[in-house]
Image: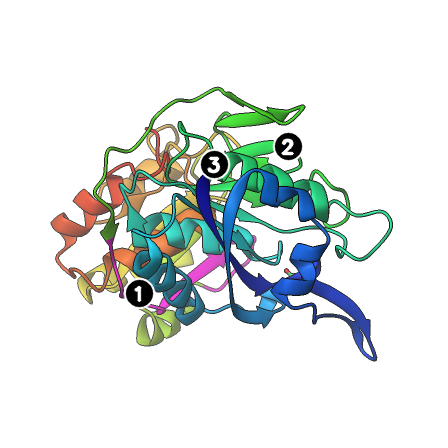
């Protein structure tokens, strides 16, 4: 029988109605009592690391989760992390960078409705996560949600209420779970061994451009952040007119050693800054990174992972463009 470690961190799945609204309160033991059938599939280990609404999740919590998985890696065959859905995409992407090449699956799941409610997606999500974590062909960091398996760097919460809360952005599902069977669409099993990273640089900022934005903000951001993600328009357009000051502002940031990534705010199909003049003019500076079809969650956490390792731009480029857990295609 497979050994699976369930790690609880909070989220709606563990929520009860409090004085000020839903608040994570159920302990892991109480949660697991709602899904007794999972003990048929595996030997369970259980650890409660925190009990947070995921809006309060910080990079230090990602490091704690990754550290615990690394510590327990030899004892278990797979890991299921119960997590709030709101920032699950950031945690899944961060874990994808902190825990690389391991042959054992790490699964994140949660629920849109608390497990103690009559109508809830929680029980199904936990059971399906355990099934996937027990599967011999599974590895890497994944979401299992509403019967779908999504690579850890590809998920995004796109619905606030429905059970199909997550989408796999610009990338196929890795698998689906039908009638308690895992149907694999993408088969790539890591050979291992697990590589563990234990540092993240939190000084990353994401700026969504709107028409009329004052480029002076770039100078202010450069004083506080090591990496800045600029979400431009369409396939890759940024305000390029000289008098708007964006090109000059970005050049100054790059000269100071700030890492700048250009991406698009359009959710699907990614960027290609070479198509229009309003992109290519920026791309002329070879120090500028382009995120192509990465999700914002993956870009932000990948920078957090890269920057403690190096501040040399060529090495940053090498690491940024290296595909990790299906994060970048270009
Ligand atoms: N606010 C909750 C959280 O992210 C939402 C959820 O879990 O669905 O912790």
Of callouts 3 and 2, the N-terminal one: 3
Residue neighbourhood size for the residue with mark 2, other residues' Cα within 10 Å, grouped as few (<14), some (14–19), many (≥20) = many
Would residue 257 be counted in the magenta stretch?
no
**In the image, which residues are magenta?**
196-214
Spatial CA distance of label 2 from label 1 is 31 Å
* Residue at screen point 25% across, 63% down: 258
Q: Which residue lies furthest to the right in this view?
A: 118
Which quarter of the figure has residue 266?
A: top right
Give the image location of residue 254, x and y in percent: 23, 59
Give the image location of residue 268, x and y in percent: 53, 32
Q: Mark 2 points at which residue?
A: 147
* Residue at screen point 12% across, 57% down: 312
Secondary structure beneath disc 3?
Answer: loop
Residue neighbourhood size for the residue with mark 1, other residues' Cα within 10 Å, grouped as few (<14), some (14–19), many (≥20) = many
Residue 218 visible in rendering: no
Spatial CA distance of label 3 from label 1 is 30 Å
Q: Residue furthest bottom?
A: 19
Secondary structure beneath disc 1?
Answer: loop
Q: Which of marks 3 and 2 is in front?
A: 3
Of callouts 3 and 1, the N-terminal one: 3
Residue neighbourhood size for the residue with mark 3, other residues' Cα within 10 Å, grouped as few (<14), some (14–19), many (≥20) = many
Q: Quadrant of ligand 1?
A: bottom right
Which quarter of the figure has residue 303?
A: bottom left
Tell me: residue 219, above or below residue 117: below
Q: Mark 3 points at which residue?
A: 134
Q: Mark 1 points at which residue?
A: 200
Which quarter of the figure has residue 198?
A: bottom left
């Amino acid at each position: 029988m497979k050994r699976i470690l369930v790690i609880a961190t909070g989220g709606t799945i563990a929520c009860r109605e409090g004085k000020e609204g839903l608040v994570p309160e159920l302990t892991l033991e109480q949660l697991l009592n709602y899904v007794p059938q999972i003990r048929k599939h595996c030997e369970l280990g259980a650890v409660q690391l925190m009990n947070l609404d995921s809006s309060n999740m910080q990079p230090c919590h990602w490091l704690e989760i990754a550290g615990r998985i690394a510590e327990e890696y030899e004892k278990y065959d797979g890991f299921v992390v119960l997590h709030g859905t709101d920032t699950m995409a950031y945690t899944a992407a961060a874990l994808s960078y902190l825990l690389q090449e391991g042959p054992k699956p790490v699964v994140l799941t949660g629920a849109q409705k608390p497990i103690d409610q009559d109508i809830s997606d929680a029980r199904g999500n936990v059971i399906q996560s355990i099934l996937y974590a027990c599967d011999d062909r599974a590895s890497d960091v994944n979401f299992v949600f509403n019967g779908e398996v999504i690579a850890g760097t590809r998920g995004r919460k796109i619905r606030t209420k429905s059970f199909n809360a997550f989408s796999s952005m610009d990338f196929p599902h890795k698998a689906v779970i039908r009638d308690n069977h895992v149907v694999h669409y993408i088969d790539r099993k890591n050979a291992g061994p697990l590589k563990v990273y234990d540092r993240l640089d939190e000084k990353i900022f994401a700026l969504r451009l709107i028409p009329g934005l004052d480029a002076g903000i770039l100078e202010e951001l450069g004083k506080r952040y090591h990496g800045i993600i600029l979400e431009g328009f369409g396939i890759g357009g940024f305000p390029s007119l000289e008098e708007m000051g964006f090109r000059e502002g970005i050049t100054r940031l790059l000269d100071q050693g700030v890492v700048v990534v250009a991406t698009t705010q359009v959710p699907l199909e990614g960027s290609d800054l070479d198509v229009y003049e309003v992109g290519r003019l920026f791309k002329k500076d070879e120090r500028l990174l382009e995120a192509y079809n990465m999700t914002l969650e993956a870009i932000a956490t990948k920078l957090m992972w890269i920057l403690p390792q190096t501040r040399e731009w060529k090495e940053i480029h090498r690491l940024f463009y290296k595909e990790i857990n299906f994060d970048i295609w270009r």
